[in-house]
Amino acid sequence: MLDYKTHFHGKKITIMGLGLLGRGVGDVEFLAACGAELIVTDLKTKKELAPSLRRLRKYPKITYVLGKHRLEDFRNQDMILKAAGVPLDSPYVAKARKHRIPIEMDASLFMRLAPEVTFIGVTGTRGKSTTTQLIYQILKKHLGLNRSQKRTVGPRASAPGLARKTLQSKVFLGGNVQGVATLPLLAKVHPGDFVVAELDSWQLQGFGDANLPAGKAGMSPPIAVFTNFMPDHLNYYRGSMQKYWDDKVNIFKWQKEGDVIVCGEGVSKRIKTRGDKIIARTRDIPKSWKLLIPGVHNRENAASAYHVGKILGVKESVIRTTLEHFKGVPGRLELVRTWRGVEVYNDTTSTTPNALIAALETLGRKKKNVVLIAGGTDKNLEYGNAAQSIKKYVKAIIFFPGTATEKMKKLLPRGFEYTKVKSMKEGLKQAVICSAKGDVILLSPCAASFGLFKNEYDRGEQFNREVRKLS
């Protein structure tokens, strides 16, 4: 395995993007502990980044450039570690490329430096968080049950790209997981371990730009999952679904013979790989398996996790038990509580029309029974189909202000009443007023969180706090 401390010791590294979600902070802590010479730069100010900066006080040698970026910090460096979401046309990244400085991202850099670990990457517009957690829980249960047995496990162990597993193996989460930085896992993993990583389109840029030896253009996880592909992030990709797809394809584009991708039916025809392709269908999960997580879309997610488990030699009984006991991921159709006969759901990660439609089709009934809390910042998306679902299932809407709200309002049927609020406390208060026994209060914003909230996690946490206060 890599001597990671020696690898990074003394290296001059610019870290572009510290953020507040914990991933940037984790990478900075790890590299500082390895003895790297760090410049940390972020467009957020010192005041905005205060929680992250407090965690880094014990590393006084770090140089900070906050509230701006400087071109001089992107030359004469050994590496640039780029956070997710850096603009495609960033002049600072262009400056580094001009000076032939490697551009890295934490998940792809980890995979390249930990070759004896089986890396399972999961992407998709929707469902990647749930699918990632399902796979993680399946492997965790599998390894726990077999730890006392003296044998080696896992078919495909001899296939290219897959480490051979021992029963002392562990499984770790990485990628786009709140509070989890992937690069520091280099200090925790051992040969034969598993890492299950949720990868959004921005993180997958790193797999296409990986700093590989001459003649190799990119890399993909040896086991990949691609749940679906729908419009999203078109504000970032300037309206181009092709540019969005170009980042997503890195999940399978560079796979080798013996690698495998599990994909949803809707995206399967677009996927061409040198490895094996398995299509996950809802019917792959027997009807007798009773899942706690609601909705057809979650059965699709479970089907993807099921196939990954089978690829790795997990017994079907273990897979079934795990799927049937999985309670879901916070903020994804999360039943927070039932209050006076009203079910209250947190679906804060619903930032697209397709996500809202899935939530309404899962929770809605013929009688309009949903009191919806929605709205926020537009991501250059179309809301026509979402408006039709609202018309079918929703009895009342409470809107947060924002550009997405203005677009949705114009598509509502004439006479459809709505309320506009400026805080989560006020929003839940209005939802309670509009609800009756047998109804559902649903936070499913169908928009980004910019403006009222720090991020979608902050939005969901505020909602849960207010719901728990209901007497």
Image (cartoon, rainbow, N blue to C red):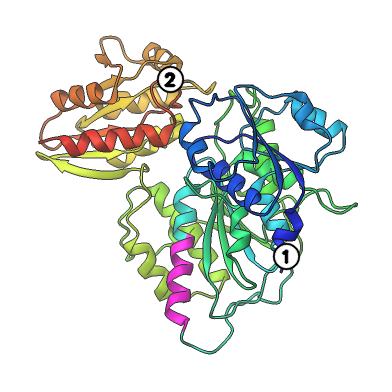
Q: Position of residue 189 (x, y in %)?
A: 60, 66
Q: Is residue 225 magenta?
A: no
Mark 1 = which residue? 2
Left or right: 442 in relation to 180: left
Q: Is residue 171 left or right of residue 345?
A: right
Please name the residue that numbered disc 2 is placed on.
451
Query: Which residue is more in the foreground, 18 or 332?
Result: 18
Can residue 145 be found in the magenta stretch?
A: yes
Q: Is residue 234 visible?
A: yes
Q: Residue at x 26, y 15 (%)?
A: 418
For residue 269, above or below residue 282:
above
Q: Quadrant for residue 336, please give it.
A: top left
Q: In x, y percent, where is residue 269?
A: 64, 47
Q: Which mark is residue 71?
A: none
First to last magenta residue range: 135-147
Circle 2: element type: loop
Q: Earlier in the sequence, mark 1 or mark 2?
A: 1
Query: In the picture, which quadrant includes the N terminus?
Result: bottom right
Residue at left offset 21%, top offset 36%: 467
Distance between the Cα atoms at labels 1 and 2?
43 Å
